[in-house]
Amino acid sequence: MVLAQLGGSISRAIQQMSNATIIDEKVLNECLNEITRALLQADVQFKLVREMQTNIKKIVNLDDLAAGHNKRRIIQQAIFNELCKILDPGKPSFTPKKGKPSVIMFVGLQGSGKTTTCTKYAYYHQKKGWKPALVCADTFRAGAFDQLKQNATKAKIPFYGSYTESDPVRIAVEGVETFKKENCDLIIVDTSGRHKQEAALFEEMRQVSEATKPDLVIFVMDSSIGQAAFDQAQAFKQSVSVGAVIVTKMDGHAKGGGALSAVAATKSPVIFIGTGEHMDEFEVFDVKPFVSRLLGMGDWSGFMDKIHEVVPMDQQPELLQKLSEGNFTLRIMYEQFQNILKMGPIGQVFSMLPGFSSELMPKGREKESQAKIKRYMTMMDSMTNEGKQLLFISNPKLMNDSRIMRIARGSGRQVREVMEMLEEYKRLAKIWSKMKGLKIPKKGEMSALSRNMNA
Ligand code: GDP
């Protein structure tokens, strides 16, 4: 079961429970059984699921709940908290500091996506003003150095490796020293993987770790490995002190739940997820927004972060102000389209903004999406300013037939197409109207705000 399906099943179970006239033991059990089934199908470890079920039952004691308590809310909150607990080990991972050299060692099985992830991690930080560097200490897999070199060159990230040296410890140490001298602040060491867990791999990992003294060891795990995830993660944790996890291939038809059990096995947080083969298909992982999204509650944290990243600084306060007033106007939609087209690659940029991803910009159909957005913009160009300011949700009648015909004529488009654009606007406005009442963040308060919105 892919994670989206898992989310759907859990939300349905909660919804069904909410539909019941009286919530008693039987209704609660049915709901929990449904959720248990969904989690097991997604390969979350059995022990964790059972624990979760027991905990919820302990928290939600229906007999003890005084009359008047909102039982549904309490149960919903308990499910949310327990899911967060599975994913949150309770302590943050080491956070590197910009300007101060940190050594980050990547470990994982061959094929897990380790080398790709090293570059994604470097690239992500480089975009944020860091000075990352890559060291290829994988001397086991033929072609590993070439792969890293190729990725690093593409992203203009300095790299270190050797075609002739076969001692991974030596390369790792030399690479780290070289980049420390060059004042790199994020020195990423890619280590060997193996097809399966074996003593030689763990010994090599241990030696590289001892010699380079990494500030953080990141365990990279393929999301499709299912129930094996827990044991695999634990085996790595026993050999080196894993401090964080990155789960890759979350875009595929994988059973992500298994890999998420890795958190419990390593007692380390998932810090990023890989969502594609490209360098920028990489997302920060935050537990609460992730669970919110899983339960269909919307990912407002990702939304805020993307606004921060995508919308030009000088436009941010105005946009947030308008959204907080519940004013998602056509002009705002127009401006966000402009931002999308400017930033590229389309589909990536706004993929986390509610409504902009799956329906407006389906993956793999970027060209069509781009053309569609341009078409919508031409139509909006032919509207008067007053038209653009119309609030469709509160004032749908204002966009009357004659206005629609004028827009179609002015832009040389069919009435049907204008209607389609307006439908799109209505859909987005409905989603974005949830931002109404938003507290406008001051500079630097963005993540705190996101946390509040998800709390
Ligand atoms: P390594 O052996 O662990 O270093 O794995 P690689 O980095 O060579 O990756 C193995 C394959 O997985 C490559 O084809 C990558 O392009 C692919 N890959 C890595 N991360 C992701 C991801 O997040 N999504 C998808 N779809 N593919 C990925």
Image: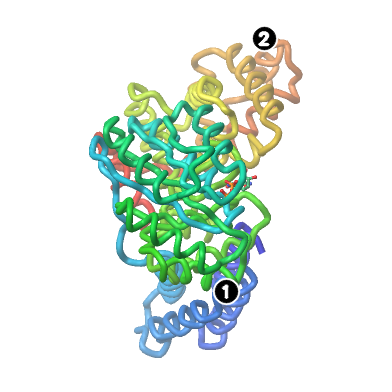
* Rendered residue at 56%/65% (across/down): 257
Earlier along the polypeptide chain: callout 1 or callout 2?
A: 1
Q: Are marks 1 and 2 in contact (CB under 8 Å)?
A: no
Q: Position of residue 142 (x, y in %)?
A: 61, 45
Front residue of 401/2: it is: 2
Residue that mark 2 sits on: 410
Q: Position of residue 212 (x, y in %)?
A: 33, 51
| Quadrant of image for the C terminus | bottom left
* Rendered residue at 69%/29% (across/down): 420
Quarter where residue 315 is shown: top left
Quarter where residue 381 is shown: top right
- Local crowd at mark 2 within 10 Å, few (<14), some, or many (≥20)? some
Q: Amino acid at mark 1?
A: Ile
Front residue of 424/91: it is: 91
Q: Secondary structure at mark 2?
A: helix
Residue that mark 1 sits on: 35
Between circles 1 and 2, the one closer to the viewer is: 1
Q: Secondary structure at mark 1?
A: helix
Left or right placement of residue 324 versus residue 198 in this view? left
Seen in the picture, residue 221 relative to 120 is either above or below; the reply is below
Q: Position of residue 404 (x, y in %)?
A: 67, 20
* Rendered residue at 47%/51% (across/down): 191
| Quadrant of image for the N terminus | bottom right
Q: Residue furthest bottom?
A: 63
Seen in the picture, residue 55 relative to 201 is either above or below; the reply is below
Q: Amino acid at mark 2?
A: Gly
Q: CA distance from mark 1 to mark 2?
A: 53 Å
Q: Is mark 1 within 8 Å of ligand 1?
A: no
Quarter where residue 316 is shown: top left
